Image: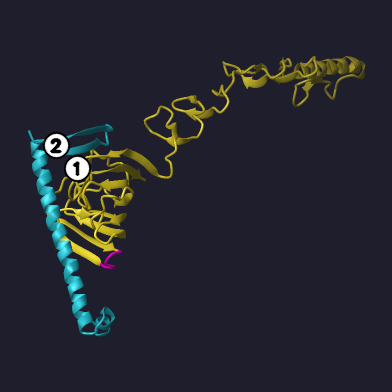
Chain colours: A cyan, B yellow
């Protein structure tokens, strides 16, 4: 039987701490959460890659970000 | 026979004969003596006199004993010397004078405690520990596994502070945050990092990046501090701002994340979830309520 990830739940009101394996439902939610996080991360990477590519294009043209600011862009 | 104006002593009439003068003088003197004695009944040092029920006749009140006070008697008819009961309820060093329906003693509190108004107490006050610097530790513990969830967070504070430190991830990954169990892509945040010296912003994330870049697996001391201002107010979008220091994976360098975020949840924050974007993590967490 495949084991699920371990999670820590701290009930702040009762100060009870539970470290246990995820339930089926929690594991599904966890998988969805990680997939969503992965997509978020891809967007972030794409954002910075686009930024880096744009900077490289500027550099090839002999321009810098300060030149763009000077142009009001 | 003529009489004096104030005390009615007999005096000779204008027409009385001289031969009766001695008797008249004796009568007048006796009357004056009697009256003066009636008005000055004191016999002993310290005696005092007070008016009796009879006109021009005072009553002697003998000197009381040491420590006695002059008071009105129980029938409210005359003064008396009396030893009064102690009028203070205080019995012990440090006691304070209190009151509920009558005078009452407030026993001294524990060292370091402060007196606090509390309408539920019979005397309206109580001794209580002073809040240390406005911070109350709500939860602390060790992180292990795939996520850490803090549930049933009290709404009794103004702000929340969450610290995670000595964090190590099992696989290179970011650390992320969700509030109130919201998993939909309704988080918006800005993150400023040192690696790119730039700001990343989004309005459609499923969580908020605490570590903007993947933390390296060898780093054992990644840390983050987050504040959730005004977290317990309903009908208001919930926000967070924080800083994180990480040993960043891809560039093999230190990185800093300075982030602000919000989630489309107007309920008071009662749950916080921290998790790595993959694998597991270890470390320590502390949650504080701030007043």
Q: Are marks 1 and 2 on the same chain?
A: no
- In-image side of B223 versus B97 (left or right): left
Location of mark 1 (residue)? B146
Location of mark 2 (residue)? A22
Q: Say whether marks 1 and 2 touch (CB < 8 Å).
A: yes
Q: Nearer the viewer, residue B13 or B242?
A: B242
C-alpha gap between disc 1 and disc 2: 9 Å
- Quadrant for the N terminus of chain B, please: top right
- In-image side of B160 versus B114 (left or right): left
Q: Nearer the viewer, residue B186 or A26?
A: A26
The percent coordinates of residue B75 (x first, y second) are 57, 16
Q: What chain letter is assigned to the residue under label 2?
A: A
Range drawn in magenta? B194-198
Q: Quadrant of residue B261?
A: bottom left
The percent coordinates of residue A22 (x first, y second) are 14, 37
Number of other residues with Cα within 10 Å of mark 2, as a class: few under 14, some 14 to 19, many 20 or more: some
Q: Residue at x 37, y 40 (%)?
A: B136
Is residue B242 visible in this depiction of the protein?
Answer: no
| Secondary structure at numbered mark 1 | loop
Check residue B196 for magenta coloring: yes
The percent coordinates of residue B170 (x first, y second) are 22, 46
Q: Main secondary structure of the magenta part?
A: loop
- In the displayed image of the protein, which residue is found farthest to the right? B19
Query: Relative to B259, is B156 above or below?
Result: above
Q: Residue at x 44, y 33 (%)?
A: B128
Q: Quadrant of residue A26?
A: top left
Q: Nearer the viewer, residue A63 or A15?
A: A63
């Amino acid at each position: 039987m495949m084991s699920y990830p371990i999670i820590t739940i701290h009930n702040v009101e009762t100060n009870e701490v539970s470290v246990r394996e995820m339930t089926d439902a929690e594991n599904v939610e966890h998988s969805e959460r990680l997939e969503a996080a992965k997509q978020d991360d891809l967007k972030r990477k794409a954002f910075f890659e686009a930024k880096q590519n744009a900077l490289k294009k500027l550099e090839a043209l002999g321009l810098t970000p300060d030149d763009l600011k000077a142009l009001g862009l | 026979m003529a009489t004096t104006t104030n005390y009615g002593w007999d005096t000779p009439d204008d027409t009385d004969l001289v031969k009766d003068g001695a008797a008249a003088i004796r009568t007048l003197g006796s009357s004056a003596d009697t009256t003066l004695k009636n008005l000055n009944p004191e016999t002993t040092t310290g005696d005092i006199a007070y008016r009796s029920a009879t006109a021009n006749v005072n009553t002697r009140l003998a000197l009381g004993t040491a420590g006695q006070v002059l008071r009105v008697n129980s029938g409210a008819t005359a003064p008396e010397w009396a030893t009064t009961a102690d009028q203070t309820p205080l019995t012990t060093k440090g006691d304070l004078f209190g009151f509920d329906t009558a005078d009452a003693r407030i026993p001294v509190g524990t060292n370091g405690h402060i007196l606090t108004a509390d309408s539920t107490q019979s005397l309206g006050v109580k001794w209580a520990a002073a809040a240390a610097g406005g911070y109350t530790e709500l939860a602390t513990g060790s992180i292990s596994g795939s996520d850490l969830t803090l549930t049933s967070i009290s709404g009794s504070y103004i702000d929340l502070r969450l610290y995670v430190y000595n964090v190590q991830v099992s696989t290179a990954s970011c650390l992320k945050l969700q509030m109130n169990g919201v998993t939909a892509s309704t988080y918006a945040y800005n993150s400023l990092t040192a690696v790119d010296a730039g700001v990343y912003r989004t309005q459609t994330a499923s969580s908020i990046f605490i570590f903007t870049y993947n933390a390296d697996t060898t780093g054992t001391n990644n840390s983050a501090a987050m504040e959730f201002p005004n977290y317990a107010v309903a009908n208001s979008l919930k926000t967070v701002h924080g800083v994180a220091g990480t040993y960043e994976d891809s560039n093999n360098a230190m990185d800093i994340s300075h982030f602000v975020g919000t989630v489309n949840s107007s309920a008071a924050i009662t749950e916080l979830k921290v998790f790595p974007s993959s694998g597991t993590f270890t470390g320590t967490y502390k949650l504080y309520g701030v007043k």
